């Protein structure tokens, strides 16, 4: 399924590199664990190999696919979603948990637009930050660039100016 050195996206945490597969004995049960290093935030995650098919982890997209997705999402006219912020929050979290770049980008863009017009609750600001982190991490790994350059690329889509790394 996945292998050491492969770039993947783990929902709610972003893109990272599989560092290793380790056999661990926890509570007397030996299981293989996937060790995932998430560079944005310097996070290390260990996932039971048995659970990998169920956690929506996926391989990162190509640079072209990322560019196409961001262009598509930022050029589409998005609905404002529910007027009830708590319902919007739940819906947006469910979308991010899919692990799909298109969903995280749509959540980020919709909240970005809403913030500029109406403002966001504190909880929605956190959702927007989470979605942005996921997008940036995938850009960083796919393009092999630092966070500040990834932010410039994302900003270029928000401003409708194409930047190529």
Image: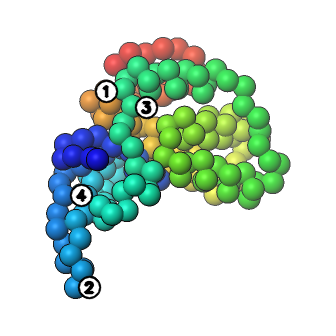
Kindly state the secondary structure of the residue where label 4 is placed: strand
- Report the Cα–Cα distance between label 4 and label 1: 22 Å
Determine the residue positioned at 22% across, 85% down: 28
Give the labeled residue for mark 4: 35
Mark 3, secondary structure of its residue:
helix
User: How many numbered dots are placed on residues in this image?
Assistant: 4
The residue indicated by pointer 1 is 143
Mark 3 or mark 1: which is in front?
1
The residue beneath circle 3 is: 151
Rate crowding at label 2 as few (under 14), some (14 to 19) or many (20 or more) other CA atoms within 10 Å.
Answer: few
Q: Earlier in the sequence, mark 4 or mark 3?
A: 4
| Residue holding disc 2 | 27
Asked whether, in this view, residue 146 is left or right of residue 3, the answer is right
Q: Which mark is residue 14?
A: none
In front of the other: label 3 or label 2?
2
Estimate the spatial distance between the alpha carbons at disc 4 and disc 3, rounded to whole Å: 27 Å
Query: Does the CB distance between marks 4 and 1 fall below 8 Å?
Result: no
| Structural distance between the alpha carbons of marks 3 and 1 | 12 Å
Q: What is the C-alpha distance between the residues marked 4 and 2?
A: 19 Å
Quarter containing the C terminus: top left
- Which one is earlier in the sequence, the residue at label 3 or at label 2? 2
Residue at 44% across, 26% down: 66
């Amino acid at each position: 399924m996945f292998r050491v050195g492969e770039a993947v996206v783990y929902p709610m945490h972003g893109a990272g590199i599989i560092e290793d597969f380790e056999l661990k004995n926890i509570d007397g049960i030996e299981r293989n664990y996937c060790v995932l290093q998430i560079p944005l935030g310097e996070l290390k995650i260990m996932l039971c190999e048995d659970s990998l098919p169920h956690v929506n982890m996926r391989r990162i997209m190509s640079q072209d696919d990322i560019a196409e997705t961001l262009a598509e999402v930022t050029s589409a006219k998005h609905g404002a979603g529910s007027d009830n912020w708590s319902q919007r929050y739940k819906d947006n979290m469910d979308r991010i948990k899919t692990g799909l770049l298109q969903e995280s980008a749509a959540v980020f863009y919709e909240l970005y637009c809403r913030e500029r017009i109406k403002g966001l609750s504190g909880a929605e600001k956190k959702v927007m930050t989470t979605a942005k982190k996921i997008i940036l991490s995938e850009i960083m790994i796919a393009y092999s660039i630092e966070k500040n350059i990834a932010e410039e690329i994302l900003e270029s889509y928000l401003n409708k100016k194409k930047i190529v790394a």
